[in-house]
Image (cartoon, rainbow, N blue to C red):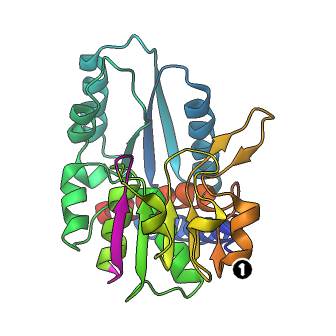
Amino acid sequence: MQIIDGKKLAKEIREQIAKEVEELKQTKNITPGLAVVLVGDDPASHAYVKMKAKACKEAGIYSITHEMPSSISQDEIEKTILMMNQNPNIDGILVQLPLPSHIDTTKILELIDPKKDVDGFHAYNFGRLMTGLDGFVPCTPLGVMEMLKTYNIDPKGKDACIVGASNIVGKPMAALLLNAFATVDICHIYTKDLAEHTKRADILVVGVGKAGLITEDMVKDGAIVIDIGINRLEDGSLVGDVDYEAVAPKCSYITPVPGGVGPMTIAMLLKNTLKAAKERA
């Protein structure tokens, strides 16, 4: 069993991005810029945005956060996004989710210029992903593919099972694996017999936010298990969706939580922002 070290890999990627950012500044006089829209006072969202800002600073990327109260109107958020679409110094726009219930999230995400959609949530970029064309890919699934590539795991011909069918993780993850010629099975809350699907998987990707969902008897010997879930237990510890201690001995590869997919998500956000800046250049 080999642990996929996302923390180490993300550090290497971020160091490479910092070099490329410096090169872009020297050769084209362009500093990549990322703008974040943060609505409300959700502690997890605030912590995540702080981590993103710190990562941008370390990589030499200019970043700005538009903090807004949870009572903000749809119109005000839309005005801010339109303003950022027009700003030539901003290459990436990211709206921290979830938004308050009175805000139409789809409308907000579709307002972002697809060329600045570094989260890859716009329907335009999602459509390009589904058809195997170049565009911006959501950061978490992109990070998973980067991990597989680094550890020389080729999805071609493998049976892959995705547990969780969200637009942010599950669906784009399935598209990426399908584009890499894996045979893909997608499971969700209405799947009748989850274990029936997971037990067949050579590559099992789980991201639903339910601690201990995947148990030892649900995983086949030698499987590659990617745990995207993150859950805080009552004692304050962080765990994934997979029962790590019991499942790990059966796997050929497994990601830990924390230190697995999480750090890769931020590294891919920086990578997408750099990509947008290069396209501007």
Against 241, residue 39 (above or below) is above
Q: Position of residue 129 (x, y in %)?
A: 26, 66
Task: Please tell me how many numbered marks the rendered image carries.
Answer: 1
The quarter of the picture where residue 278 lies is: bottom left
Find numbered disc 1 in the image and state the secondary structure of the residue it sits on.
Answer: strand
Magenta highlight on residue 193: no
Magenta highlight on residue 184: yes
Q: Position of residue 57 (x, y in %)?
A: 62, 49
Residue drawn at (53%, 56%) of the image: 265
Q: Is residue 123 left or right of residue 69?
A: left
The quarter of the picture where residue 209 lies is: top right
Residue 244 can be seen in this image? yes
Specify start and end residues of the magenta stretch as a single range.
180-190
Residue drawn at (42%, 67%) of the image: 197
Q: Position of residue 113 (x, y in %)?
A: 23, 46
Residue drawn at (39%, 21%) of the image: 100
Crowd band around label 1 with a 10 angstrom C-alpha radius: few (<14), some (14–19), many (20+): few
Residue 137 can be seen in this image? no
User: Seen from this angle, which residue lies furthest right?
Assistant: 235
Q: Label 1, on which residue?
A: 2
Dot 1 amino acid type: Gln
Which quadrant, please, contains the N terminus? Answer: bottom right
Residue drawn at (31%, 49%) of the image: 121
Which quadrant, please, contains the C terminus? Answer: bottom left
Q: Is residue 143 left or right of residue 93?
A: right
Against 2, residue 268 (above or below) is above
277 or 131, nearer to the observer: 131
Against 152, residue 111 (above or below) is above
Q: Is residue 110 left or right of residue 58?
A: left
